[in-house]
């Protein structure tokens, strides 16, 4: 373990579990931001392919997936409203 990794892991280990996930997400985002567009597109295509293969294995159709996405988006939209003062309600 390097001189950088040891204190970093120590700091992360002291965070509440919920914040550790935020740190991991940030590190993954940072890693992705270093990739060129071709590599990102390859990773995206591979992820979509894997998702569709899994969906087919469980007999989930594209229409099922689209309906689920629509439902989640509608639920989020109904929970997030903006009042006249510009705040979230």
Image: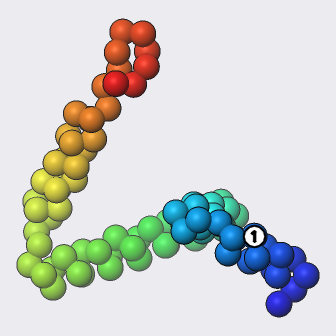
- The residue under the point 12% across, 81% down is 58
Residue 68 in picture, x, y percent from top left: 16, 56
Residue 62 in picture, x, y percent from top left: 14, 64
Inspect this view and state whether residue 36 appears: no
Task: Specify the farthest residue to the bottom.
Answer: 1
Number of residues whose C-alpha sits closer than 10 Å to that of mark 1, classed few (under 14), some (14–19) or many (20 or more): few
With 86 as the anchor, is 23 left or right in this view?
Answer: right
Q: Nearer the viewer, residue 59 or 5?
A: 5
Q: Quadrant of the N terminus?
A: bottom right
Task: Specify the farthest residue to the right.
Answer: 3
- The residue under the point 83% across, 75% down is 7
> On the image, which quarter does residue 85 sit in?
top left
> On the image, which quarter does residue 78 sit in?
top left
Q: Nearer the viewer, residue 11 or 48?
A: 11
With 33 as the anchor, is 17 left or right in this view?
Answer: left
Task: Specify the farthest residue to the top.
Answer: 84
Q: Secondary structure at mark 1?
A: helix
What count of labels does the image hold? 1
Q: Nearer the viewer, residue 31 or 77?
A: 77
């Amino acid at each position: 373990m390097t001189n950088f990794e040891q204190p970093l892991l120590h700091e992360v280990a002291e965070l509440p579990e919920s914040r550790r996930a935020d740190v991991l997400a940030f590190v993954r985002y940072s890693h992705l931001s270093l990739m060129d567009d071709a590599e990102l597109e390859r990773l995206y295509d591979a992820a979509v392919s894997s998702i569709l293969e899994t969906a087919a294995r469980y007999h989930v159709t594209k229409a099922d997936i689209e309906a689920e996405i629509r439902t989640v988006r509608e639920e989020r939209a109904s929970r997030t409203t903006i009042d006249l003062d510009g705040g979230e309600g």
